Amino acid sequence: MVKQDSTYEKITPKSNYSDWYNDVLSAAGILDFSYDLKGMFVWLPYGFKLMDSLIKKWDELFEKNGIQKSYFPLLVPLSYCQINESWWDKFKEEGYKVIAGADDKVQGALRPTGEPAIYPMYSKWIRSKNDLPIKMYETVSSFRYETKQTRPLIRDREITNWFEIHTVHATKGEAENELKNHVKIITYLYEEMLALPAFMVNKPSWDCFPGSVGAYEFYSLMPDGKVMENGSANNLGQAYAKKFDIKYKDDKGVDNYCWQLCTGNGARFLAAAISEFGDEKGLILPPKIAPIQLMIIPIVFKGKEKIIFDEIDKIKEELLKQNIRFEVDAREISPGRKYYDSEVKGIPLRMEVGPRDIENKEYPLTIRYGNEKLKIKSHELKNINNIINDIHSKMLKASNMRLHESIKFVNSSKDLISAIESKNIAKVYWCGNQECYDKLIALGEGYEGFGTSTDSKGTGKCLNCSKPSHEELFIAKSY
Amino acid sequence: MVKQDSTYEKITPKSNYSDWYNDVLSAAGILDFSYDLKGMFVWLPYGFKLMDSLIKKWDELFEKNGIQKSYFPLLVPLSYCQINESWWDKFKEEGYKVIAGADDKVQGALRPTGEPAIYPMYSKWIRSKNDLPIKMYETVSSFRYETKQTRPLIRDREITNWFEIHTVHATKGEAENELKNHVKIITYLYEEMLALPAFMVNKPSWDCFPGSVGAYEFYSLMPDGKVMENGSANNLGQAYAKKFDIKYKDDKGVDNYCWQLCTGNGARFLAAAISEFGDEKGLILPPKIAPIQLMIIPIVFKGKEKIIFDEIDKIKEELLKQNIRFEVDAREISPGRKYYDSEVKGIPLRMEVGPRDIENKEYPLTIRYGNEKLKIKSHELKNINNIINDIHSKMLKASNMRLHESIKFVNSSKDLISAIESKNIAKVYWCGNQECYDKLIALGEGYEGFGTSTDSKGTGKCLNCSKPSHEELFIAKSY
């Protein structure tokens, strides 16, 4: 963070994605990795501002959808954890336990996910249909003692800034409608905020969140050709309601188990956007979530300071009117250094204001995405939001295209392997049988069938057993 | 939370403050206490919205003051904790430790305060004067395994929504200036947001935050006559810098230890405001932090629905212009039930809109604080902000007066005891000697000398040893 004022950090070429990713997060002042606990790190001010900017968007979005913010304790009594044994079986191995007191008594677990903290409360709160639906969320840290290699924002032991929505409904139909709504919300965050495609799949039932009856899952294609799970909307059916005794009495006094959903994601959103767009110079942030959308750099000449800063004051006024998030870099260092900082931090627009520009009534404007340079006339400053929208559209179009070009519909094992080994996603017809699935993903090391298409239309032959199939299964290496 | 739609909760008279406090938090939908871990509870949506409203204010305020938001891991390696033994000695007894893995290895402590997580990083980040000042804060949960009786928002085991500012400076003078700034910030939150007096004292040195060289501490006088510590601004001098090796090289290449401050508080702000103003009907929220400032209640008559809701649309437009936080309670339940809900939740203003009011072009407006009823003409709606400011001023004046009337300057042991036992704060001359201090607070059970006046002017005799003294010590029962 602070180092940036004095040194330039070297960024590994993006072809070595893994090192590049760490370099970029560090050079841009997003995270500090030197905290002495594996899988935990420090959010630096610029990084936190970026995260916060995305959090504010989802806060707004959830509130608009009647989903209310709340907070449940970080510690979960073990007795709550054990209520749903299929959940506990999955998470107890990687659970952190908390001890205290003279005898180091176990007080509870640090929550790996929210269900066991939240659902015992839901059980108490719900008596009649009037108490439904409940639509709540929280943005919290979750904890998993990962034994795999950790990777910042992607696989952490403290998963910071994780939102989880937990809704409860009286009927299956209402739950299913709400699930569609959650899908819309995640899709909006992808497309309208992150400029990324919302690549959604159906999860095979054996691969769903423990205890759920179905799930939509979102994936991002990373620069190394692996896919990363990046958000999920889980249909819990009545499974958790039965475990946690979440039920309501209907008009006839009969008990009915409720229908539940849980939908969550977190900083992986950022990991995907950073990975998609960044380059050797640093970040390239999607402008809708950039904490600073425009950096103004005064080109100061001796004796001209007043003219320049007066002009900048006028520009600021115009930008405020448009709700543009901008800053003026008035530090007493070289413009070159300022350009570097603005680039490494991925600030979408950089505008220079010098004496000649003021005379000419137009300012050099550099667009970080694509490094496009143009001049903007002072009377056109009112269109900055259009420029921002335009950048956003171009970024979304490009990321969308990269994803869709990388999906290869294949009908032979050879082509499947070739697609995946050349960093693509293979799509194959599949009969739906787990045995065939297991054989297909055994074709290469680290292959995973991560879901089926939500809009498959045709029919073909299962790539393994040749039976007629209408399921289209995606296979790739995954995180 | 949900229960409120069907039942009325009984609230204990405020003369029994302890029960009243819990009743109010529960009936208003602030917290749920039924979570099965001592000293931990659930923030319900309305409660969290209130907390969030205050957090947004401090976020704004800190940003304006160049104090940047960040996030440090919740787990602290024990090696970091042990760097400052005076800190560790104070906190290790009440520390939660975290274990994980097959062998239940200790991974670290859940942070009781932020220093040991943050300062090892500061040590790495600071090389030269250019890296200074550092002004960062975070809003996090802290954890203390309290063995005393816990009390929601006042003494919790998970202390939620705790802000802590940690700044580092090159010189003592700069640190002291910044300390004044922190005092201003806390004072602003008290007076301008919470409508409470900022009652600040100097801490006796032996009672300061471990390792600090001095502190301003803020206290609130609670309804039971006890004082509650409610925010502190600590001058750490160079003590922590020496422990954590936080230093910079000056122009001559000589190492200098830095000067540090830490300033923090959290939900106790809310506990004080709730306790100060609430009554037997529930909360009375200071309007500047009320998540809903005005509740509109449609008085619906059959066939008149359109007229009423059209008029409400016009009113909403006017309120939006003024950035008033309002809601319309359009539930299909009786107006009486709506009045009850609006009162128990402490919403500052309640406005009814019925057919006759529309004809008369004036609406009944009830002010929760003081239960004042007036009529507001439709063309006066543009003055709602003035009404809000007026409520705020009245509340601040009253809370200020209660505090100052309760401070009794006494010069005999008998008067001291009589003041404290009648739920006041005693103020006495004191020579500054710890021995005298100990004797003074031994005069009654639970008495504590919680600090000295920051603006004492006169000279008197120490109440214990009769030596000439200019220190004015406050003594009361405390939390």
Image: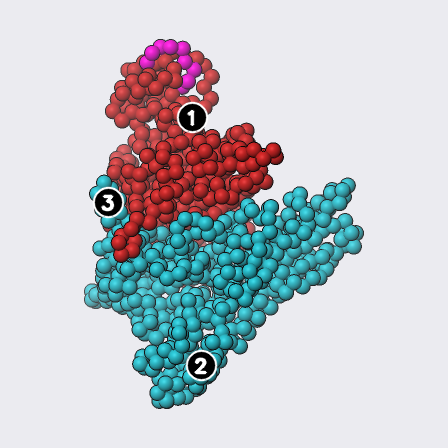
Chain colours: A red, B cyan
Residue type, mark 1 in image: Asn
- Tag 1's secondary structure? strand
Residue A25 in sight: no
Pointer 2 with pointer 1, Cβ within 8 A = no
**Residue at image point 27% right, 26% down:** A446
**Tag 1 subunit:** A
Say which quarter of the image contains residue A437.
top left
Say which quarter of the image contains residue B368.
bottom right
Residue type, mark 3 in image: Asp
Residue bearing the label numbered 3: B104
Label 1 CA crowd tier, 10 Å (few <14, some 14–19, many 20+): some
Relative image position of residue A25 (x, y in whole percent): 32, 44
Indicate whether residue A291 is drawn in magenta: no
Relative image position of residue B68 (x, y in whole percent): 39, 56
**Tag 2 subunit:** B
Residue B309's disc is: none
Magenta residues span: A464-472
Relative image position of residue A246 (x, y in whole percent): 48, 37
Residue bearing the label numbered 2: B416
Which of these two is toward me, B343 or A83? Answer: A83
In the image, residue A255 sits, relative to residue B345, either above or below, namely above
Residue bearing the label numbered 1: A202
**Residue at image point 26% right, 44% down:** B100
